[in-house]
Amino acid sequence: MPPRHAGRSPVAEPGHPPALRFAAVGKRFGSGARQVAALSDLTLSIPAGRITGLLGPDAAGKTTLLRLAAGLLRPDAGRLDVLGLDAARDAARIQARIGYMPQRFGLYEDLSVQENLDLYAQLQGLTPAERPARYAELLRLTALGPFGHRRAGALSGGMKQKLGLACTLLRVPELLLLDEPTVGVDPISRRELWAIIANLRTRGVTVLVSTSYLDEAERCDQVVLMDAGRLLVQGQPHQLAADLQGRCFAVRHVTLDRRVLQQRLLTAPGVTDVRLEGTGVRALLAAAAVPPPLEGSTWQPATPEFADVFVDRLQARQARRVALQVAQAAATDKTDKDVVLHVARLNRFFDQFHAVNDVSFDVVRGEVFGLLGANGAGKTTTFRMLCGLLPASSGELRVVGQDLRTAPAEARRQIGYVAQKFALYGNLSVAQNLAFFAAAYGLRKARLRARLDWALAEFELGPYLDRNAGDIPLGYKQRLALACALLHEPPILFLDEPTSGVDPLARSEFWQRINQYAAAGTTVLITTHFMDEAEYCDRLVLMSQGSVLASGTPADIRARAASPDVPNPTMEDAFISLIAAHEANLRRAA
Amino acid sequence: MNLGRLRGLIWKESVQILRDPSALAIAFVLPLFLLLLFGYGVSLNAEHVPIGVVAEHPNPQTETFVGTLRHSRYFDVHELPSLAAAGAAMAQHEIRGFVWMRSDFARQTLGPGPGTIGVALNGVDANTARLVQGYLTQSWQIWLAQQQQEQGAAPALPVAAQTRIWFNPALRSRDYLVPGLIAVIMTLIGALLTALVVAREWERGTMEALMASPVTMAEILVGKLLPYFVLGMGGMALSVGLAVTLFAVPLRGSLLVLAGASALFLLVALGMGLLISSLARNQFVAGQISIVVTFLPAFILSGFIFDIRSMPTVIQGITHILPARYFVSILQTVFLAGDVWAVILPDAGALAMMAVFFLGVTLLRSRKRLD
């Protein structure tokens, strides 16, 4: 697709040369047959004094681009100028003027917050006289002041990222390079990180930040969208979204369940993407397409978002349409309130630490039920107890009527489980992984063959059959893990952070599958820290520090956070306001 | 080199050493453990070796000979009734060998002309067998001399050797092993300390952040080298202290020479560790490589246990590129013989060249880049 940004992208003001200029830059890794091009013929300019977002699916070349800009890699082809200096020859001079925060920022975990700051202040050559003022400002911005003496290793993920950013900003750099600074960070820390980044605008700092959260694109002055080492488009996010005006619709149907509606529309001609939203779906049409005729459906124009731009620009890589093979009766038959999972007053202690505090909920057959919360909220601990992997300290747990304490084997046979980070055997091939899990679930003969054939066809694993599971792309690992969990056709599917670290395209494809299984009657219990994924759940519980803050449908939870200031809160707004209220309660109690 | 940044790096490394017990464990617990294990476990002396004695016709002569054997600290004597019983005991590893005295023992040994006694040894452990053979001959000669003295006859042997043993008069193998052992231990510790901590910086992502900062590669390397040099010298001091006190190894040379040679060797070992860490960027692999390329060759080829001169020529050649070889030689000399400059100077020269080589290659190889 030709870039359509000509005359559109923010033009550098006269007298302000771009902070970064890539001219036909190429970078390859490996050698011989295993050589991969991380960047190919990349030409692009990043304007000075602006915040530029770098987006793209896995293996788009985002990290390579940032490392080249930091002088940590040398281009194989082309020329790269950073702040007017040749990156290949003047790396040392560039490094004295930039700040770079790698994906896993180098905090020294044995050092305290203050000691990390001291170290980086010394490394960046701050004089002792300059330090107190910088420390005070950065500790205020990051809200890390009260934790000055805590060891960096004992901080939460969000606090670590904030400290990393503070260390990078001790000497205000001319150019700041951030590689996915908000990955796995709780919503509150994420807001604080973005507030610090936005604040740099006033100091004239150029910021280049890569991210896999599409909503963050809208916080940037302009975005660069990449795929497979090439530039797809560069421009201002709201203008790119405005290009899609007239192609986005909120669709509702009088009788069809939203998941069935999604499946119908995905296979309709001229439809690029369909996501669940509220009680209906959100559809993105191909350019110049008209809404497909579907009796009983109403189409309301919707405001395009950057997520739509992302899908539209990357549609060539969009997954195949998951065809609907679901009997409609199964899909709408959720009224009998057949409880398949019953959790009551569940508690778990690790020594003195109360990891799960009095958690109760019921999950009904065919429902997608979400456990939402930041890292450390107690989601995974709850999950492990549900799977029978961890005994509960107290409380009641029933899976399809069977008590996990007395009949764990029976209960487990009802469950398909996908563990965090996909517990696969990295040095077995895809085929061997499937064969192993099939054997572990006791599948034999005709049924074994039938299920293996199903897994290969359903998840399109054919091209990777003989590759080691450790070497295949993350999106395919996710598919393989799901295939392994579904081999024995369990009525309940447990998914622990299945979308963590997976790029937006693979996430969207994953949810299409989950919706398909749910529509067919499988009960799905899923944990996630992506707030936008909450919309895909029928009901959910919001957890923080081991306790349930709220439970209900996504709309219920959002409604609880509505206020005159924020009449239509997002799930993230709701999460933040509920946590604030919860903490206020705790303080009052104490 | 910017002194402010270097000070920051050294301070950071020191705080980490004090807070993370793994570096302290490598520097102090590992040498303690290895010294105790090898110091007590490895002994090249054969003592209290079980041997059998078969006397076909017990009489005063056989009794006095067995008595001589009993008094020797080298043997535990088992008297056995017959040759068959002795054979069976040997097969069952109850005895390492036996002495067979025939019925005409007295006439054979004290009569004119050459006489024989039978000695059978278990040759499976060739080294011990050879030692036992030597001890038996010695005991035999002592007994013979006593017998002849009692009968007023002059010793029959025309030449008697008067042996004086230099440097290790008590012939304690431990005195010879422990200094060599210290060299082997310091090889492992020096390489492990730097290899593991640099690999840890790669694993935790701190190296990438350092590289994108204004810090130079030389500052990073010196910032690693200095703190671990101090730590390694501490480990060395502990080892020497244990050798002198616990194992009572004499230290005949000067402490100053010992410290100087140790410092030189530590630079080589730390340099090897840095070079390994520039190849292996995770702690597990770095640890494995350190053990395989530094510890094992040092153990086998440094001359610490196995005499280099009895190795095949090719292997002897290879030992010349092992730093531990020179340090073993220096330590054995300084501990047992004293400051013998003719040995120490060439060895120290070789170590100095190696230190320059390893540190130089590391500096050349280390670019502030990830590709």
Image (cartoon, rainbow, N blue to C red):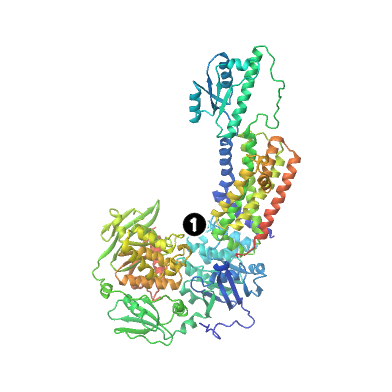
**Residue A171, percent from left and from top:** 61, 67
Residue pushed farthest front?
B113
Residue A123 occupies quadrant: bottom right
Residue A73: in sight, yes or no?
A: yes
- Residue under mark 1: which chain is it in? A
Seen at 36% across and 76% down, the residue is: A277
Q: Amino acid at mark 1?
A: Ala
Out of B217 and A205, give the one closest to the viewer. Answer: B217
**Residue B251, percent from left and from top:** 68, 35
**Residue at numbered disc 1:** A154
Is A544 left or right of B266, judged from the image as shown? left
Seen at 58% across and 70% down, the residue is: A28
Residue A39 occupies quadrant: bottom right
Out of A232 and A114, give the one closest to the viewer. Answer: A232
Q: Secondary structure at mark 1?
A: helix
Residue A574 occupies quadrant: bottom left
How many marks can you see?
1
**Residue A424, percent from left and from top:** 42, 61
**Residue A59, percent from left and from top:** 51, 70
Which quadrant: the C terminus of chain A? bottom left
Seen at 69% across and 54% down, the residue is: B357
Residue A177: in sight, yes or no?
A: no
Out of B202 and B345, give the one closest to the viewer. Answer: B345
Residue A376 vertical placement versus B304 (above, below): below
Residue pushed farthest right?
B342
